Amino acid sequence: MKKIFLVSLFLLSIQLISFSQSADEKAVATTIEKLRVAIIEANEPELNKLTSPLLTYGHSNGLLEDKKEFIRALTSQESKFTKIDLSDQTIAVSGDVAIVRHKLMGDTHNKGKDPANVKLSVFLVLQKVKGNWILLGRQAVKLL
């Protein structure tokens, strides 16, 4: 009986460890949250800090932006998010690369357009550079 209890406790410990986030996964999640806030606030210095010079940012309508265009669109309010909620987020880290998937529900009020709701499935690639995780690539598709 004691042996069964110890084996069960060992297996439970292994399972709990496998479900906990690594330090890198936590850091990636923190970066994603900072990016979410910076997008809503159109915070140019923070957006610059959180994105790679090689950024490829894909929108659900097929539009592709580089870092300069991505930040310009947000700071000019051509692309304006008033609310972003993220859910069902998964993070996988391999060396200095992280793959993130989540669902994004948000409200937009883009320049010259009526307010709208967006429902997206998003795929992100981040890279660890000098100890910091930065966005390298993003692609979104509309949820039906």
Image (cartoon, helix red, strand yellow):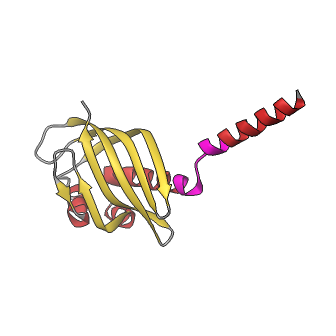
Q: Position of residue 6 (x, y in %)?
A: 83, 35
Quarter of image, res 46: bottom left
Q: Residue furthest top?
A: 1
Query: Which region shows up in magenta?
Result: 16-26
- Rendering coords of residue 128 (x, y %): 46, 65
Residue shown at 25%/56% (left/top)?
Answer: 57
Relative to residue 14, is residue 68 drawn left or right?
left
Q: Work out whether residue 44 or residue 136 is closer to the camera in this orientation and state it.
A: 136
Where's residue 32, x and y in %?
A: 42, 52
> Residue 33 in magenta?
no
Please state which of residues 73 and 142 is positioned toward the viewer in this rendering. 142
* Residue placed furthest toward the right: 2
Q: Main secondary structure of the magenta part?
A: helix
Q: In the image, is 11 to the left or to the right of 113? A: right
Specify the quadrant of the image occupied by residue 64. bottom left
Please, is residue 81 above or below residue 93 in the view? above
Q: Is 24 contained in the magenta span?
A: yes
**Furthest-left residue in view?**
112
Quadrant of the drawing holding the N terminus: top right
- At horizontal 34% and vertical 40% (from top left) the residue drawn is 104
Residue at 26% x, 64% y: name it. Answer: 67
Q: Is residue 33 above or below residue 70?
A: above
Residue shown at 66%/40% (left/top)? 16
* Placement of the C terminus among the 4 image quadrants: top left
Q: Is residue 104 above or below residue 39?
A: above
Count of numbered tags = 0
